[in-house]
Image (tube, grey):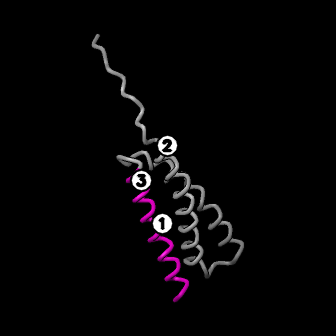
Amino acid sequence: MGTHAKRPIRPDWISKTLAGLLLGLTLAFGVSGLLAQALAAQPLPVRGQLVMWAVAPVWLGVCGGVYFFTSGRRAWAWLGAANLLTFGALLAWRAS
């Protein structure tokens, strides 16, 4: 049997994790806000439940997907840009 060298744990997993937790949560809140705007015609109890329960899947999806970035810096950059786009769209939608 051949010997396999163990791959060390990448040192940027902490920055990826923090990017997913912090920027992922804010992104989930932004997506939730966009969903609230899109569902404005729905009754408040229905809209409130959909918007509230949309946060968890988005946040968990971001937290799980953040490890596909090649570095922590890229995770912060892409998630930061996604946050800017999301909240920019939300502000533009609310202003119109």
Q: Is residue 68 left or right of residue 46?
A: left
User: Extreme top residue here?
Assistant: 1
Q: Which mark is residue 93?
A: none
Total numbered labels: 3
Range of magenta residues: 73-96
Mark 2 is surrounded, within 10 Å at the Cα level, by few (under 14), some (14 to 19) or many (20 or more) other residues, namely few
Q: CA distance from mark 2 to mark 3?
A: 11 Å
First in sequence: mark 2 vs mark 3: 2
Which residue does the numbered mark 3 point to in the structure image? 75
Residue 41: in magenta span: no
Which residue does the numbered mark 1 point to in the structure image? 83
Q: In the rendered structure, which amino acid carries the disc numbered 2?
A: Ile
The residue drawn where x is 62% and y is 67% is 51
The residue drawn where x is 68% and y is 70% is 48
Dot 1 falls on a residue whose secondary structure is helix
Mark 2, mark 1: which one is toward the viewer?
2
Q: In the rendered structure, which amino acid carries the disc numbered 1?
A: Asn
Which residue does the numbered mark 2 point to in the structure image? 14
> Percent x, y for residue 5?
32, 21
